[in-house]
Amino acid sequence: MSDHPPTIADGPQLIAYADRLGGDLAGLRELLDGPLAGAFDGVHVLPFFDPYDGADAGFDPRDHTTVDPRLGDWDAVRRLSEGRLVMADVIVNHVSADSPRFADVRERGDASPWAPMFLTLSSVFPEGATEEDLAGIYRPRPGLPFTLMTLGGRRRLVWTTFTSEQIDLDLRQPQAWDYVASVIDTMTRAGVRLLRLDAVGYTGKEPGTSCFMTPSTYALTDRIARYAHERDARVLVEVHGHYLQQVEIAQAVDLVYDFALPPIVLHALTAGDLAPLERWLAVRPSNTVTVLDTHDGIGVVDVGESDLRPGEPGLLAPAQIDALVERIHANSEGTSRRATGAAASNLDLYQVNCTFYDALGGDDRRFLLARLIQLFVPGIPQVYYVGLLAGNNDMDLLAATGVGRDVNRHRYVAGEVEEALERPVVRAQLEALRLRRTHPAFGGECRWVTDGTRGTATWRAGTGSVELSFDVSDATFQVREGDRVLMSDVSPAEA
């Protein structure tokens, strides 16, 4: 990008739903200022718009410029941003089928001034689509991305990449751009300084392409980023795909997720194999946000082969991925199998639905080592609230909703949070996060060395350094500052 994006703090950030951790925006702020103080430089507040509990846990906003009043208002967002970075989602690909604009299109069809804002089959293929055109469209779920609807008395094939309740936008049209711009304006006025472009890879529908990460997608992302930079904000692009595609995307955007890291770390800790991590560290981009778990499932497309890059092997071979998925199912005592794929709605082809803690069999030592590896990998570390609290799969919530990803979206009440914060594995994570946030060595250079099942990561700035040494075969580890042991697999160092 030719312009200069604003700088942001690169310390750890929390990922949380306000209603599921804290109860609302004010409650989330109280946790960050209270028991979580000193651990995080920022927070990614998952969708808090109207409504936050729609068909896709807030990723189907009816009104993207309004805070759901059950959670607070924009003043509450502004107060949350005082002294910390706030990240929020700009849901650029779609809106709720219940949005007022689309409701007007349902009633009036092409007579509605909002009709050009929404995509139908003919919006992209005005001369009609061939079988080859339709078969080539990339989609994260089975079937074609269209829903038969009646618009103004006329039957139409409306473009719905994810679910029939989420109507895709035509970002080529001024109505759609003005809508997205109004969302960015509203957020940045409330102090949001990092914008997560949700599902942006699907926005560039072009004939003769896969309709995923096309030139139009890059052009739109660049336009949004420039608009955000003018408002003192940066953008994080959320794209799942082949790892080489991520490397390419990173060259054109502010920030990308390191979605390859979670399955590679799981593979290392369950198969005793650091070779894929070594290969990834050699090529991964530096402008990344690292995660172990998020509100979605654990991705495997990010380390595997992909139809988007035919002939290019992944970071893990197909047999390694199959073995990893089966180990996750075994470690979770089968609960992840009941939440994944055809076993649950909101079907995703490339994710295993499981908490990261259960994916490692509830093994505190292996889980803590996974977190330390994340914190020592270059990038901005984000920690999901369920992972922070070492949560188990919520099978009761899965049974209530039938949505596979809900196993990793537990609703914590106050007593549960307090109880979780007393667990040694949670206290150790907070200690590691505070170290990552405050130690000056993390502002310097990082060097990784692997040898068989052993690894060493050293951050150094000036004469100061911090080193993580570990062995994935038995999950032993130490964090040292010179001769001083800060943390070990035996117990966290005294505060």
Image (tube, grey):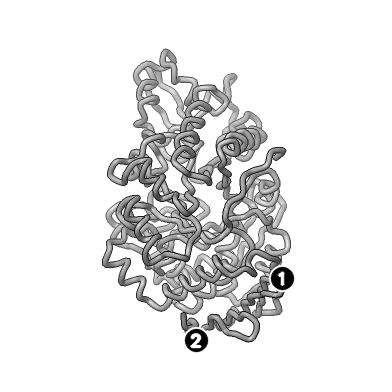
Closer to the chain start, of discs 1 and 2, is: 1
Quadrant into which the N terminus falls: top right
Instruction: Look at 39% across and 67% down and name the residue there.
Output: 389
Residue 274: image quadrant is bottom right
* Secondary structure of residue under mark 1: loop
- The answer to whether any part of residue 398 appears in the image is no
Amino acid on which the number 2 mark rests in the picture: Val
Instruction: Look at 57% across and 47% down and name the residue there.
Output: 236
Q: Relative to 310, is 35 above or below?
A: below
Q: Relative to 155, is 90 above or below?
A: below
Q: Relative to 217, is 338 above or below?
A: below
Residue 9: image quadrant is bottom right
The residue indicated by pointer 1 is 462
Using the image, tell me which numbered label, if any, was put on residue 490.
2
Q: Position of residue 232 (x, y in %)?
A: 57, 41
Amino acid on which the number 1 mark rests in the picture: Gly
Q: Position of residue 460 (x, y in %)?
A: 69, 71
